[in-house]
Image (cartoon, rainbow, N blue to C red):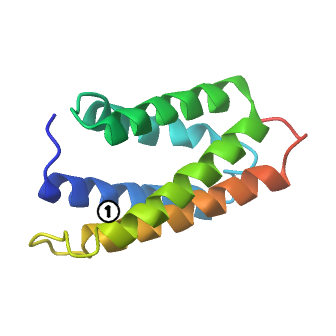
Amino acid sequence: MALTSANLNDHLYTTNLSLGDLFNNHTFAHDPSGLVPIIDSWVPYLQNSSSSVTTTAAAALSQLKEYVQTGDRTNASALLQSLGEQASKSASNAHDWAGSHGHNGIGDQLRHLGQLLIMAAGNLKAHVGSGI
């Protein structure tokens, strides 16, 4: 699967909607396993890239999946925080990379993703010790 600005923006948009739904159902902090299908939808996009940034992101997502599946709430929270910060930082570099889409451009999608991931990290951190 090749990354293009169109499919990247569409996938970010869908991911942000899915994450928003996951966090709004008020079960995420107790059972973050809903992240697994979202992670699985991103790894093929990222791991087959020639860019070290995207392959590093794929490895981080694979590690996050392992943390979620093994109940390592502390490391999952820390990695979500880091990924959120990286997405937010990337948003400032992608501000003009938008394409002709019906929804916001990639910079806006990355900024929103960063906010969602940081929120998820906070939710998990607040429940450390209660088990995943």
Residue placed most toward the observer, 46 or 101: 46
Find residue 63 and report its horizontal and vertical position in percent. Answer: 56, 28
Find residue 113 and report its horizontal and vertical position in percent. Answer: 45, 62
The quarter of the rendered structure image containing the N terminus is top left
Q: Quadrant of residue 123?
A: bottom right
Q: Is residue 25 visible?
A: no
Find residue 99 and report its horizontal and vertical position in percent. Answer: 12, 69
Q: Residue at x 84, y 50 (%)?
A: 127
Q: Residue at x 41, y 35 (%)?
A: 56
Q: Is residue 34 left or right of residue 111?
A: right
Q: Is residue 27 visible?
A: yes
Q: Is residue 8 left or right of residue 80?
A: left
Find residue 58 and report its horizontal and vertical position in percent. Answer: 40, 33
Residue marked by disc 1: 13
Other residues around mark 1 within 10 Å, as few (<14) / some (14–19) / many (≥20): many
Q: Is residue 129 left or right of residue 37?
A: right
Q: Residue at x 60, y 37 (%)?
A: 33
Residue 10, compared with residue 32, is above or below; it is: below
Indicate the secondary structure of the residue bearing disc 1. Answer: helix
- Number of numbered tags placed on the structure image: 1
Q: Quadrant of residue 39?
A: top left
Residue 47, compared with residue 109, is above or below; it is: above
The quarter of the rendered structure image containing the C terminus is top right
**Residue type of the residue flagged with mark 1:** Tyr
Residue 90, compared with residue 80, is above or below; it is: below
Furthest residue in direction left, as rendered: 100
